[in-house]
Image (cartoon, grey):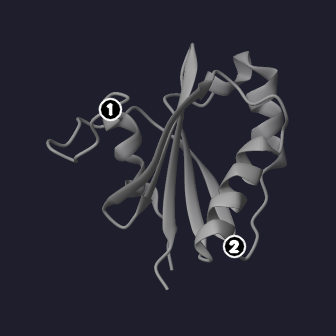
Amino acid sequence: MQTLWMGVRPGPGLTRVLVQDGPVPILKARLPEAPQHPRALETLAEGIALWYGRPLYGALGVAAEDALCVSPRWHATVDSLTRTPLVTIDLVIGPPRPPRAGAGLAGLGDFADVRQLPLWEPQP
């Protein structure tokens, strides 16, 4: 059973989310800057995993370790992250790598910096 992948990239005005089934994008969204509830990110991931009946790995990517400290709602979200048999979400810290060309993600922007988060998939 293939694990779904979800990349989340918070930004100053919005948060971008990309969910993929292998190389195929299945969900792409632009959401408000920060979640209103600490469990919103985990609940979103769990809902997608339940919809597909498969586990989901998520990467919450920030450019610097202190980047989330400016938003108490993101700080609460990171503090409440748990691992379940169905959903794992890891905090990924580091600058985006250069975008890859041609990933077939037309519509809401290229999501290049979110697409790169699969580099931090969990180790078996």
In-image side of 87 versus 61 (left or right): right
Neighbours of disc 2 within 10 Å: few (<14), some (14-19), many (20+): some
Amino acid, disc 1: Gly
> Does dot 2 land on a helix, a strand or a loop?
loop
Which image quarter: residue 12?
top right
The disc label shown at residue 83, or none: none
Tell me where residue 5 appears, x and y as whole percent.
Answer: 48, 60
> From mark 1 to mark 2, how far is it between C-alphas?
29 Å
> Does dot 1 land on a helix, a strand or a loop?
loop
In-image side of 114 versus 106 (left or right): right
Which image quarter: residue 70?
top right
Q: Nearer the viewer, residue 16 or 82?
A: 16
Q: Residue at x 75, y 65 (%)?
A: 83
In-image side of 66 versus 99 (left or right): right
Q: Residue at x 30, y 62 (%)?
A: 23
Whether 124 is drawn above or below 104: the answer is below
Amino acid, disc 2: Leu
Whether 113 is drawn above or below 103: the answer is above
The disc label shown at residue 86, or none: 2
The disc label shown at residue 107, or none: 1
Q: Nearer the viewer, residue 66 or 109?
A: 109
Q: Residue at x 29, y 32 (%)?
A: 110
Tell me where residue 108 appears, x and y as whole percent.
Answer: 38, 29
- Say whether disc 1 or disc 2 marks the residue closer to the N-terminus: 2
In-image side of 102 versus 4 (left or right): left
Residue that lies at the very extreme toward the bottom in this rendered image: 1
